[in-house]
Amino acid sequence: MGAMKFSHTFIPTLREEPGDALIASHRLMFRAGMIRKLSNGLFAYLPLGLRSFRKVENIIREEMDAIGSLEIKPTVVVPGELWKESGRWDSMGEALLRVKNRLGADFVVSPTAEEAVTALVRDELSSYRRLPLSLYQINTKYRDEIRPRYGVMRSREFVMKDAYSFHTDEGSLDEHYQAQGRAYRRIFKRCGLTVIPVRADSGAMGGSGSEEFMVESEIGDNTLLLCRGCDYAANVEKAGCKGDDGPPSGGEAPPLEKIDTPDVKTIGELCAFLKTDAKNFIKTLIYRAVNVELDLSGAPGSETLVRTRAAPGAPESYGEVFFAAAIRGDLDVNEAKLAAALKASELSLASDTDVVRITGAPVGFAGPVGLSSVPVILDETVTGMKDAVTGALEKDVHYRHAVWGRDFTGWLTADIRTVKAGDRCPLCGGELYEKKGNELGHIFKLGYKYSSSMGVSYLDENGKSHIPIMGCYGIGLDRTLASVIEEHHDEAGIIWPVTVAPYHVIIIPIKYQGAVRDACDALAAELEGAGIEVLLDDRDERAGVKFNDADLMGIPWRVVAGDKNLSGGEPRVEIKRRSEKEARPVPLSGAAAELAEAVRSELRALNG
Amino acid sequence: MGAMKFSHTFIPTLREEPGDALIASHRLMFRAGMIRKLSNGLFAYLPLGLRSFRKVENIIREEMDAIGSLEIKPTVVVPGELWKESGRWDSMGEALLRVKNRLGADFVVSPTAEEAVTALVRDELSSYRRLPLSLYQINTKYRDEIRPRYGVMRSREFVMKDAYSFHTDEGSLDEHYQAQGRAYRRIFKRCGLTVIPVRADSGAMGGSGSEEFMVESEIGDNTLLLCRGCDYAANVEKAGCKGDDGPPSGGEAPPLEKIDTPDVKTIGELCAFLKTDAKNFIKTLIYRAVNVELDLSGAPGSETLVRTRAAPGAPESYGEVFFAAAIRGDLDVNEAKLAAALKASELSLASDTDVVRITGAPVGFAGPVGLSSVPVILDETVTGMKDAVTGALEKDVHYRHAVWGRDFTGWLTADIRTVKAGDRCPLCGGELYEKKGNELGHIFKLGYKYSSSMGVSYLDENGKSHIPIMGCYGIGLDRTLASVIEEHHDEAGIIWPVTVAPYHVIIIPIKYQGAVRDACDALAAELEGAGIEVLLDDRDERAGVKFNDADLMGIPWRVVAGDKNLSGGEPRVEIKRRSEKEARPVPLSGAAAELAEAVRSELRALNG
């Protein structure tokens, strides 16, 4: 084939910035002619972009193959029936793109493939000898984002590698889970990416069933808590922290007492009114939760609740349940943690009307004392409070001297606190700080959720039937590619790590004619012969335009050939690394060998 | 990596045939564990199937790259707006899977990508210097087939390579069209497929703007007309034929005369009644056509018709038009040819009610004489008829002695005849015969349809604006793979051409232990080192089971290693080609080299 000539490809570079690009990767992928927008959240890769995309794809494929995961290709459009079996047809919400075909059958444009892969496997797992089994695909996915933004970083259609594994026991699952974790670390390293692995429930909560691979990003949709003292890193949705010193010691509090608090509604106002600190308050919020799988038998207000199954095999759940959540006045409830504690698929603050109905008072006077219409969830900070102020379920009235265990207990105690910068690391007690992050990958022990709801079983050595335990392992290709650009660029353009660069070397003849042309052609042929990918800028453009485009496209090595350097004693060309400022002349005769070795050594460093 | 061990992969072979498999490829892909069904018309590729699928994909990619077509990746879900611009949102019918997203916007799950690629390109074609431009994708497509059948041969979701080219002039288009045609021939040859290239409008109709690549198949949905005398091959939808000898010479026919034909409705009954031959009849059918682009100004019945555009830039068309089609009584109207002549997107026989309204008589008495409510389309066989019988637009009445030009003329004359076996080749006059065929690929000169309706333009050397001319070039990957199996199998299973075989060699140890195990491992390592793809059947199964699976999977070369052959003087293994009956012993020491050379020489023969 020989080197690709610029005039034979289709790289529509642009000087202007796209109006809607808010981040560097979007801006640069657009300007470098890597992508074009078909519609909001729908991007097409042009040839230059696709080359880098395929390199990310191949790195991921190699690492999956290396850990024995097997590639398959399910369909993109999958039967809605499967999603009804797992219960996600109902629980998935509006991001699931549902389609009815001409015959009226329901389909889904896959956002993920737990259902499809579980369905594929369930008829084939006759024997334990087929296990463990790990299958992956690299395929188109669709999420019907309301506000797709940031180019391919958060688009509606994207490509994901998603793997699913099936095991006879937790030990086998953990082994593959660890292998996936190592593969992910290798994938990101090979792509030149600095990732923050975030174990969802490490430390305080024990176990390790989920790990997210984050990149720091100012537009990240995740808040991470990191420790200055150790390598603790957690998503705020899961982050724990060391508790404060216990409540002040001292004698028994006076008896519970009602106080009038007219026109005082916020904790701040209450503090001022009572001349005390928010730490002595119990803040209580009423929530509405949907699809609650937690067993509420015997809980306050549960008499009228009914548990149902979305499908045979799907877990039982309550459609809609109201809860009260109580937390120390200086802290905030973390809704993700609360939803996890309730095993609810959705959670939101109750409406004012519901608050009045449930607490008998307007918003602002809820409290755990005497609240019996709904289950009360106490944050861990509330247990042990010995002299607290809290709402009294009457307008303009609060209690003081409320004592946990004496005046109230909750129905359930859980860690539902939002951990913040300045809180203390659950592992080492060091100071936590915050970063914004974007999730590129996620490995997760699914447990029996899908295998059980979708009826997968296998026979053991003794012919006894069991349900396999599952794991799932996802990584977004588009996001990974965009994140490489976020981490590797400057004012002038992209600075590709050589592993994912669309070409390794760009050759720029000052004018593509005569001896310069011959030298460039020969150099390109020699490089291609050595397995180096070359783009030859044969355009009839000014040198400055070509230099700018080379910087914009971010090709790791640039070779410039002009009459001046080629004539004279020893013919020379100029070599420049994209990441460095200065070009240096090298003899034409040795240029190919030097470049090939430079490229290979960088490849080794990243892939090694 | 080393060779893949059977126990490490996931190849669920089956002895039973799937109940719904009607053709060999479906049956064998299922039994060999290559595919599984997710739902009607939705198939997942398992690891073995995906390996062969990727080989077909890579062959296609290499051949596209070789002719300078550039790979891109548009989205699978595309904005409905683009399909409205081209007019196909309305004209495409129910096979187009339309989706509304959560915001109420229209989308399409792409069955093809003329719109998407044209939209991508239109903002970038500022100058003639960007042309010619050929872009391709290998991507998921969806067609909402009512009755998907035959496994991946006619599924709802499938993968297609579709290329689109843009040119300044017809010469440039033709050059790329020819290059695509050559690439297609190479692709099919490399896959070991025998294809019948069918030029749609060669011969009689002149030009060559479309070529279909067919494989013979008893379940093919195309009828092909082939010539015994030359290489003429045409789809019945387009096939022409040499006309018969002209009408019998002789004097002027008597004047037109009405005859009563009570209880006589079919041509056969009429022939008996009038004691004459069907060749002397004019059969007239009333059709309802939809989205008719043909200009009908001045045609009978056109006064009330209104031409509209589905979108600005889309071609003008009439929503619904009725036509009469008249053809010689012994022939049949070909609806595809008639629709093409009318430039209609859909065509069907009119309802009985419409026939009465249009002809003034029940079905069976239509004729071109005096029919003035709709345009009459005459087949070429009707022009020149000098003494014909035809319906008289009255119940139980026919005309005889009808003479073309004297008693009637049509509004349009066209070739709308269904060519049949036994008709004469339009090129050489030889006898035509029929075959059923499946279309694997299609190359097509689109002309200005999309570039014009979607507003694509470029500036020439003088700054003048022009619309580029386009071509499109599709090939179905799943179908191509299935067709390879259709052509290459026997009772026991698949017989892969080595280019698309999932593995080149399968090594079968009689028992995978001791010296046999060592010999197999060493042989596998040596083969892998030589670039040969090896599957090592390490299962603890009877030899017969392994042999059967090897035959079923169709791996081109089989090596069997057992204690008996390995011990003794010179250790030996047995080698067998899948396509041959007999195994032969070869020395273990030379086995790898011999197999590697055999595989390479077959690869060369197919790829060369």
Image (cartoon, coloured by chain):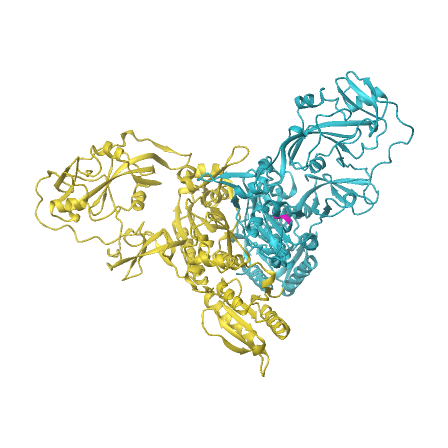
Chain colours: A yellow, B cyan
Residue A564 image point, x, y percent: 57, 78
Indicate the position of residue A309 as horizontal and vertical percent values. Answer: 38, 34
Q: Quadrant of residue B25?
A: top right
Q: Which residue is more in the foreground, A398 or B554?
A: A398
Q: How many circles with numbers are drawn on the protein?
A: 0
Residue B425: quarter of image: top right
Query: Is B158 one of the magenta-colored residues?
Result: no
Residue A312 vs residue B57: left or right? Answer: left
Which quadrant would the N terminus of chain A be assigned to in this image?
Answer: bottom right
Residue B389 percent coordinates (x, y): 82, 24
Is B229 drawn above or below residue A585 in the view shown? above
Residue farthest right in this picture: B250
Is there any visible trace of residue B569 in the rendered image? no
The secondary structure making up most of the magenta span is strand
Q: Nearer the viewer, residue A6 or B317?
A: B317
Q: Is residue A299 left or right of residue B551?
A: left
Q: Which residues are magenta?
A: B472-477
Place of residue B41 in the rendered image (x, y in percent of width and height, measured from the top left): 57, 39
Left or right? Give the position of A229 relative to A27.
Answer: left
Residue A296 is at least partly visible in this image: yes
Q: Residue furthest bottom?
A: A569
Q: Is B160 on the left-hand or right-hand side of A340?
A: right
Residue visible at 56% across and 69% down in the picture? A507
